[in-house]
Amino acid sequence: MPRCPRGGCCCRAGCDTLPRPATRREGYTGAVDTHFTDAAPGVAAFDNTMPLANKHKYKIMGALAALAVSAPLAAQQPERLEPGTMAGRMAACTACHGSQGRAGPDGYYPRIAGKPADYLYNQLVYFRDGRRQYRPMQHLLEFMSDDYLRQIADWFSEQHPPYAAPVPSRLPAATLERGRQLVMQGDSGRKLPACVACHGEALNGVRPAVPALLGLPHDYIGSQFGAWTNGLRHAIGPDCMADIARRMTPEDVSAVAGWLSSQSVRSAAPADKLPAPMPMACGSQAVVEGQP
């Protein structure tokens, strides 16, 4: 295959010189520069003149997309990428989400370690197929098969690195108390169910597909409510979280995000089941549970 004239760019990041695979089943074949720097081991060289927004994100996501599925390239750095293991292949994910998926250090990329496997699988499919809009994730997953997405989800669900200490919130006490009330009790007058009604009494998620809410950064939580409200994030209908998000005010979102992100994790393992039926119909849960 000819060498890409732009160095570390991959095909979908703007290079039309190299051929692209016809389908995701054929695998990703875009070239990536194999020169690694000491300052950033595992990240390919990147042309800074490339006309892309957020170049540093594409540098990581675009280059490591090829690393994740390229055994020959991984073999060049066996001590770093552990070729042949899922840990080595998942370097494309942990570059942003932290070692073992424990969360990124920048206060945005969420923890994915230990989350229920079906939840992780659903989100990977949603990113790949466009239900969730975030270009680096879409580029990374575009040509990955359902089977490989399942392997990724299973691997991260089995990782249990320790949680970092929560960051104290700077919000007023009254705002945090409002957040606590919404999380623990909801607001029946506005048809807002309590978060614990679906995400578990300890907010640690519920198998097989309900995620934990603790251990997530404030900005990430707030941005997801915005994505649901503005139609950038979708689940299989009925999309319960989109309905809930649209009933919440910006003040509600800030209060909930502030309270959740400042709480310590009491139990890392997801619950096996909820004590009562969910208060709303959620399409993604029905599909996982085999309901029509």
Image (spheres, rainbow, N blue to C red):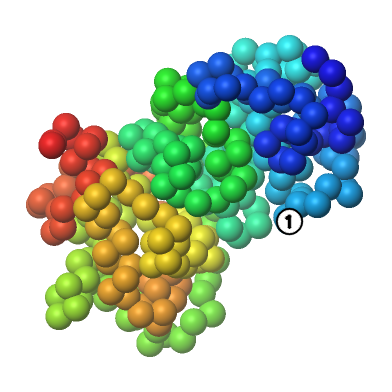
From this viewpoint, is residue 36 visible? no
SS at badge 1:
loop
The amino acid type, in three-letter code, at marker 1 is: Ala
Expressed as whole percent of the image width and height from the top left, the position of residue 144 reads 52, 26
Q: Quadrant of the N terminus?
A: top right
184 sits left or right of 160 in the view: left
Name which residue lies at 50% across and 51% down. Answer: 133
Q: Quadrant of residue 108?
A: bottom right
> Vertically, is 160 above or below 26?
below
Of residues 139 and 248, the one nearer the viewer is 139
Name which residue lies at 80% across and 29% down. Answer: 17
Name which residue lies at 76% across and 25% down. Answer: 18
In the picture of the structure, the residue carrying the numbered disc 1 is 53
Q: Quadrant of residue 251?
A: bottom left
Of residues 95 and 215, the one nearer the viewer is 95
41 sits left or right of 92 in the view: right
Name which residue lies at 89% across and 31% down. Answer: 5
Expressed as whole percent of the image width and height from the top left, the position of residue 100 reads 56, 35
